[in-house]
């Protein structure tokens, strides 16, 4: 496409007015301007001076009106862990294949409808099955303590057909966690470690 043909053309909110080096000087409907390379104009990647992106972002925040809420912050953190390679948590989540269901990935409104408001600052979002991603059927609000019991590092112990983590059994039988843990490391059974058997 030649300079003569491109000048005067509209691309979204932009109208090409002149050539400026290797870019096109475009006037935006809002009154602003933008300098854009040919490819971005032709493929639709740039359609305004930046005002359109701001309007869309603003509309998204106004839709749920909760951009500063605890629930929104939990949703945003989930997205960062799974979708942003620059997040320090990405290697443990998105980097190892933990995904976000389509319903939640780009819609806080859907997330809020499924999970409800975060009950309090001590609550975080827990995946019930740590090998599966974030979805309504695999997530719940939980305390850090509850989440720590559900990590892949938690060792489970069975007593009378019931399975729990060591910390849960210690709470039930009133035994210090480190005392029970030390006994287990010495080769004692879970029952002996908890003091319910000799």
Image: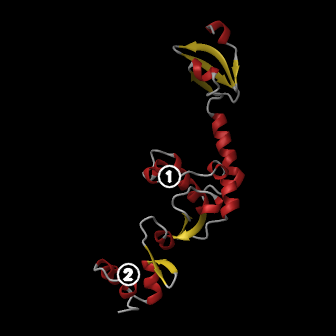
Is residue 65 visible to us here? no
Question: Which numbered marker is on residue 181?
Answer: none
Q: Residue at x 65, y 17 (%)?
A: 16
Question: Badge 2, how many Cα within 10 Å: few under 14, some, many 20+?
Answer: some
Q: Is residue 158 above or below residue 40?
A: below
- Position in image of residue 45 (x %, y %): 61, 28
Q: Quadrant of the N terminus?
A: top right
Regarding mark 1 in the picture, which secondary structure is present there?
A: helix
Which of the two marks, 2 or 1, is nearer to us in this view?
A: 2
- Relative to residue 148, is residue 36 drawn left or right? right
Residue labelled with disc 2: 177
Which quadrant, please, contains the C terminus?
Answer: bottom left
- Which residue is at the far left? 186
The quadrant where residue 188 appears = bottom left
Residue at x 65%, y 15% (from the top left corner): 17
Return the disc, 2 or 1, that comes first in the chain's sequence. 1
């Amino acid at each position: 496409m030649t300079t003569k043909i491109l000048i005067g053309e509209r691309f979204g909110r932009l109208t090409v007015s002149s050539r400026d080096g290797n870019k096109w000087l475009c006037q935006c409907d809002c009154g602003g301007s933008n300098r854009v390379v040919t490819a971005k104009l032709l493929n639709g990647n740039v359609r305004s001076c930046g005002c359109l992106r701001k309007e869309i972002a603003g509309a998204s925040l106004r839709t749920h009106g909760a951009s500063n809420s605890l629930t929104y912050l939990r949703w945003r953190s989930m997205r960062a862990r799974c979708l942003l390679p620059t997040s320090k948590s990405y290697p443990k989540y998105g980097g190892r294949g933990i995904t976000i269901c389509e319903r939640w990935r780009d819609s806080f409104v859907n997330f809020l409808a499924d999970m409800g408001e975060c009950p309090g600052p001590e609550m975080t979002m827990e995946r019930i099955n740590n090998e599966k991603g974030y979805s309504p059927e695999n997530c719940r609000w939980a305390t850090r303590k509850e989440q720590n019991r559900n990590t892949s590092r938690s060792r489970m112990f069975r007593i009378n057909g019931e399975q729990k983590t060591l910390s849960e059994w210690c709470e039930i039988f009133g035994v210090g966690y480190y005392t029970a843990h030390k006994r287990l490391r010495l080769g004692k059974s879970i029952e002996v470690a908890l003091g319910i058997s000799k």
